[in-house]
Each structure stands twice: as structure tokens, then as C-alpha cells.
């Protein structure tokens, strides 16, 4: 069985929830604007994100929210106290509205997640 493409997964999400589809698309756009060389791969029912070959997180749509997962989130010094989860490695931020993307400082957390995973965000400053 061939791997599901990002486009096919996005269409599945859209059919289930227009709101979650819009949130996932907004997260993808923000990720590309914030980090250099972002690659996407459909795995584990979501879109896994990597930059310059370093996997650092993923975006997953659930019934009531969209979760942005950070692979090495437990090693992030959480500047705003917004990371959720208590597992050994991963942490996540739940998004319920488009406003949560800025209110929960997602761009900052994306950079921190990539750094925690051992990558560089390529940004200056």
C-alpha cells in the first residue's frame, strides 16, 4: 500500500472538519514561514515535520482540536508554560481556534522544537 500523500490526508481532514483543516493549513504555512527547508511526511495519522533532515514534530487533527507535537519537547525550556504532556520525550500544544496560533506563541515553539531536536532554524538573531 502506498503511503498517503499530504494532499490526501488534508482532504480527509477537510471532510471531517473545515475548522481543523484551516488550522492544519495555518500551522503548515507558519512552519514554512518560520523555519528553513521544512519537509512533510504523512505518518502515524498526521503530518510529520522535519527541517534539513532533522525531524522535530508533527501536526495531528483530532475531533475537537489540532495538536502540534514536538519530538523532543521535554527538553524545551518552556518560556510560556504552554507545553502539554508528561511523556518521556514529546510535548504538544493544542489549538482549537486560529487565534491560538499566535496566542500560544507557536512560531517561537517551532524554533525551540527544532533546536531541541538538534537542528538549526536557519534564522538570524
Image: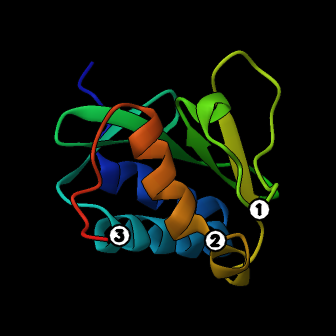
The tag earlier along the polypeptide, 1 or 2, is: 1
Please give the residue where the numbered disc 3 appears in the rendered image.
34
Residue name at image x 50 percent, y 27 percent: 44
Eyeballing the image, is 29 above or below 38?
A: below
Q: Position of residue 28 (x, y in %)?
A: 40, 65
- Seen as rendered, the residue at the extreme bottom is 99
Horizontal side of residue 12 vs 79, given as left or right: left
Q: How many marks?
A: 3
| Real-space CA distance between mark 2 and mark 3, rounded to the nearest whole angstrom | 12 Å
The tag earlier along the polypeptide, 2 or 3, is: 3
Please give the residue where the numbered disc 1 appears in the rendered image.
80
SS class, disc 1: loop
**Picture quadrant where residue 37 is located:** bottom left
Quarter the N terminus occupies: top left
Q: Position of residue 76 (x, y in %)?
A: 61, 40
Which callout, 1 or 2, points to the residue nearer the camera?
A: 1
Is the Cβ of the residue at disc 1 closer than 8 Å to that at disc 2?
Answer: yes
Residue name at image x 62 percent, y 74 percent: 18
Q: Position of residue 30 (x, y in %)?
A: 42, 73
Amino acid at each position: 500500500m502506498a503511503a498517503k500523500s499530504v494532499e490526501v490526508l488534508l482532504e480527509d481532514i477537510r471532510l471531517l472538519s473545515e475548522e481543523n483543516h484551516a488550522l492544519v493549513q495555518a500551522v503548515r504555512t507558519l512552519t514554512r514561514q518560520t523555519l528553513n527547508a521544512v519537509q512533510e511526511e504523512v505518518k502515524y495519522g498526521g503530518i510529520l515535520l522535519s527541517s534539513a533532515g532533522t525531524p522535530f514534530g508533527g501536526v495531528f487533527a483530532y475531533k475537537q482540536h489540532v495538536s502540534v507535537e514536538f519530538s523532543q519537547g521535554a527538553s524545551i525550556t518552556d518560556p510560556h508554560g504552554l507545553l502539554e504532556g508528561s511523556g518521556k520525550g514529546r510535548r504538544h500544544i493544542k489549538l482549537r481556534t486560529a487565534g491560538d496560533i499566535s496566542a500560544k506563541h507557536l512560531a517561537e515553539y517551532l524554533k525551540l522544537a527544532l533546536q531541541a531536536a538538534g537542528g538549526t532554524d536557519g534564522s538570524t538573531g
